[in-house]
Image: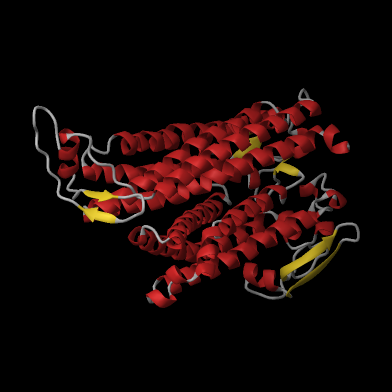
Amino acid sequence: MDIFADQVLLSRIQFALTASYHFIFVPITIGIGLIMAIFVTRAYRTKDAEDDALARMWVRIYTATFAIGVATGITMEFSFGTNWANYSRFVGDIFGAPLAAEALFAFFLESIFLGFIIFGRNKIKPALYVASAWLTFAGSALSALWILIANSWMQTPAGAMLSPDGNEAWITDFFAAAFNPSTLPRYAHTVLALLVMGAFVTIAVAAWYMHKGRNSRAANAMLRVGGVVGVISVAFLLVAAHASAVEVWEQQPTKLAMMEGQYETEAPELSAFGFVDEESQEAVTLGIPGGTSFLATGTWDAEYPGLNELATYEQFDGLEVDQLPVNFVYQVYHIMVAMFGLIVICLLLALIFGRARAKHGVKNMKWLQWLLIISPVFPFLAIQTGWLTAEVGRQPYVVYPSNSGPEGVFLHTDVATSPSVQPFEVVITLALFFLVYLLLFVGWWRVVARFVKAGPVHDKPANVADAAAVEAAGISFKNVGTDGAVEAVAVEAVETEGGAK
């Protein structure tokens, strides 16, 4: 097959798969980072053992997900120097600073304070423990900023110039490069989507406990927290998504045209679904005429250049319309929009029936429990298809010639790979990555499932010193069984010849 002889296509597939796999864990890590910080704070304020046990459960889940996320991100960094060597040479002067800053200022911050959370529970002051939880979340969000800075520069280059030999992009203004036209809209859009993911994971765990008839108090708390975080994040996400769409409208015209399957110049419609026939260059869609024009400009009749006209612009040198993956971009973009609708529906159901009386609440609605248990699939698909829209939509450029970008600063994908990497080598690594990643996923799933199945279990102090540390934190000790029943017991620390009972 031709696909196995196309080194560029294979390299693109490999990077897409490794990035998509890595982005299973990044949304969960950042999303539940906020959830973890909220429950740690709740335990600090209430001094209640069950709240403390719930916080500890989310610390465990966060730690396992963080670890696997770090491991799966390493392969992408290696691929920059192997499969994408020419690309690395072109952007090396630009990417060095943000990638180094991500490691120094964000990853280290997150790792250090996560260490405080894991190992310092009874060794540091409770207030510092709470602060560590929030700083861990802040570190993960800051890490996403530096990565988005690097990726956004590929979408809308700024603060750079082309080297005299035309082989490199040289940085001329760090802040202009870092805060290029798409950085802040895309960062807000991405992080809010990740918070929605965290909210839905929390709601799913709560629904699973309700389905099993366990941990009722913890389930109610998680349903409330997940619902509130989800609603607030979705509300702000609407604003961020609009800002991101306007940025695409202004800076990346070929991407917007592919998102709506638009070949000819017209006022683009806002379609709900459809199909794009790339051979005939016709789109069969169902939508609102001029709807996309209205969202971007506030008017229904603002015309926008189609792909055929854009291909004649000197700016888009080498753009071959018949080679563009228009239908793919159209489909993944509209899947993302559809998933957002399902997200809103699930949140409304969780909030309405989560506060309803017991007879009509989530606890007695099996169908709603199952819907909420599988609901993290919706934000997950929205995030993945959103990334596919952003990355595939900028083809055939790996560094896009945006409308405000420096002259000549762009790079075609087919010249960004390394000529020394052979197609069979990429195929071999693809197969090995699949096997290793499958094992990693199974291991992660089993560990997290075990934490969830065990539930919010509070560990008994092993000795008098540990019991004193718990009491010093102000936590009233309770014995939490695996079935979620909480039994208040008196803590008695009686030393008898060095023992405790």
Quarter that holds the C terminus: top left
Res 341 → quadrant: bottom right
Q: State the scheme by which the image is colored.
A: secondary structure
Task: Give residue 106's position: percent from left, percent from top.
Answer: 43, 37
Question: The N terminus lies in which quarter of the figure?
Answer: top right
Measured as percent of width and height from the top left, residue 448 is found at 47, 44
User: Closer to the camera, 120 or 315?
Assistant: 120
| In the displayed structure image, the side of residue 489 where residue 437 appears, left or right | right
The residue positioned farthest toward the right in the image shown: 280
Q: Which of the 4 quarters of the picture holds residue 357?
A: bottom left
Where in the figure is residue 45, as x and y percent of width and height? 23, 54
Q: Between residues 106 and 178, which one lies in front from this camera angle? A: 106
Left or right: residue 43 versus residue 162 is left
**What residue occupies the far top of the structure in this picture?**
420
Looking at the image, can residue 171 be seen?
no
Count of labels shown? 0
Q: Is residue 338 left or right of residue 320?
A: left
Q: Is residue 57 left or right of residue 235?
A: left
- Please name whichever residue, 152 or 458, is drawn nearer the observer in this view of the structure: 458
Residue 46 in the image: above or below residue 62: below
Residue 418: horizontal and vertical position, in percent?
Answer: 74, 27
Q: Work out whether residue 390 can be spotted.
A: yes
Q: Residue at x 73, y 39 (%)?
A: 13
Q: Is residue 239 above or below residue 14?
A: below
Where, by quadrant of the figure, is residue 171 drawn? Answer: top right
